[in-house]
Amino acid sequence: MAMEITRPGKSSLIVESPVMPAAGTAGFGDEYKSLVKLEKLGALVTNPVTFQPWQPAGGTRVVPLDAGILVHTGLPNPGLSKVLDQYRQLWAGLPMPLILHLVGTTVEQVRQGAERIDRENSVDAVELGLNDDITWQEVEQLVKAAITHTEKPVLVRLPLGDTYTLARAADDAGAGALVIAAPPRGTARDPYTGRLVSGRLYGPLVKPLTLRVVGQMASKVDVPIIGAGGIHSQQDARDYMEAGARAVQVDSVTWVDPKMLEWIARDLGGLVLTRQAGALGDEWFPGIGITEQKAREEAARKSGDTARKKN
Amino acid sequence: MRETQAIIERVSRLNEHYQRLHLAVEDYLKDVKPGQNLLARLTERWDPYLRELWWPVAAANSGLTVERPGSQRYEPGQSVSLLGPVGQPFRYRRTLRNVLLVAYDTAPTPLVMSVDWLLSNHISVTLVLSGKAGLYPTQHLPPEVEVLHADESLSWPNRVMTVGWADQVFVAVGQDDEMVRFRQVWSLFKELRAEIPKAYLFGVFQPVQPCGVGACQACMIALRGHHNSLVCTEGPALDLTQVMLE
């Protein structure tokens, strides 16, 4: 079930399933290989990568919340060149497109990063991550810096906030698709240290926030939208599609229930589940669910009976 | 690393602060090694959200035993989703004769599983319980284990001799600020020994782990020489001579 999730053109991104992990939740490609059937995903979005190496944040990184978590990692990574060297071979062997999440730091670094990625056959698209306090002018500059230096599709992940203004700027600058949205920021008290910690919020409660924005943006901008935030079930993902998203990104549920990522991908990839207890339709009959399969078998049996009677 | 279901067969109390859960598990989990842990989820709901970090303390043909705080409530017959084994086994030296285990303001639970293995390999074990670790009962430990109680400043009788004899040291600290506490431990050992060689003093890290597979990178520790290490995939025991404690 091939579908185009970016603007049509010579460098559009076509996926088999509209479900992919969100940046920062599934690592760089092989972390979940023993827990999730990666081939069921539409694409793989890498952890955030910066042009220069970034070190992990100091102090508390994770604060458990009621029905969610706050995470502040500092986006540690060895820098774009080392990441490409380290994972090139792995990505080339992946059964689905690879989207590299490039952190939009400065125009110059985005320009250099886009040039570097453009030469990489193992990368199929770029997802540009934006700062939460960014202005629409900066969005325009960063997106232009990326799309003028790579022919690969450029997706832009927007922060929650003045999303409409930023979405318009990204759309005008030529973004291939908009990812709405980056996990919202929050502050919570660390129960171990007693200190206040700021970071990104994950959990089911994020979904209503972003779903509303996705619904609003779908009717206001022409560029395809990828919904992201708080998806914890197949129905959550379908809600985003109903609101106008072309595809979805699944985030923290992968950490606590890794199989859910695969189930959502199977479900939205056309492999509809027809019974409870975790059984997956395509495991016993590829492409259709058990109800449809039984209906076809019954129809075939009846037509066989009719043919025998005629004889 | 796999995800599997287990059943709590029995709950036994060590004292009012600690309890043990005896689990029926798949065979591959019975091979879990000292140092490795599990991420457990007991409910289909999203509160609590994260999986609990469970430390096995014994593995046998009959199943797996884990140790949990006494304040948590578990029921026999309860089904548990387990992700694991998480992390790498403790790396012991080949010429090991004496091991010092230190629990500083935390239960020694992450270290307990290694006790039986060490004793069965004729390695002597000294366990130092400091601060809040003093609440941990020791009657169930094998009599060969030398148990020493330290005060909150990590001071115990014959400290110089204990540290001098130890071929390797594994330290678990309170989770309130692991880096600060490991710095204190490092300073203490620097005072007690002229030199701290590589693979001698290990910190057993217990950060909150959202994923356990190295994807979220929330448990990343900065090492010397601009390297990083993930506690969930390369830990939990990291050589403190390599860790950037500052």
Image: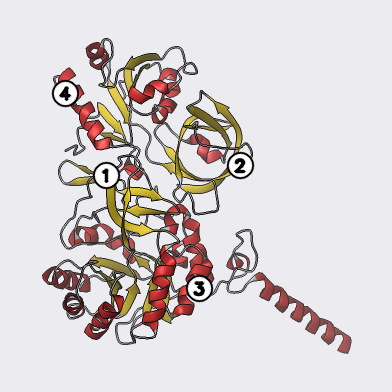
Disc nearer the start of the sequence (2/1): 2
- Location of mark 2 (residue): B78
Which amino acid does the dot numbered 3 rest on?
Arg
- Location of mark 3 (residue): A238
- Location of mark 4 (residue): B190
Which amino acid does the dot numbered 4 rest on?
Lys
Alpha-carbon span between mark 3 and mark 2 = 32 Å
- Location of mark 1 (residue): B229
Other-residue count near label 4 (Cα within 10 Å), few / some / many at <14 / 14–19 / ≥20: few
Disc nearer the start of the sequence (4/2): 2
The residue located at (19%, 51%) in the rendering is A55
The chain containing the residue under callout 3 comes to A
- Element under label 1? strand
Position above or below: A14 against B154: below
Other-residue count near label 3 (Cα within 10 Å), few / some / many at <14 / 14–19 / ≥20: some
| Front residue (pair A269, B46) | B46
Other-residue count near label 1 (Cα within 10 Å), few / some / many at <14 / 14–19 / ≥20: some
Which amino acid does the dot numbered 1 rest on?
Ser
Spot occupied by residue B86 in the image (x, y as percentages of width and height): 41, 42
The chain containing the residue under callout 4 comes to B
Q: Contact, CB < 8 Å: mark 3 with mark 2?
A: no
Q: Nearer the viewer, mark 2 or mark 1?
A: 2
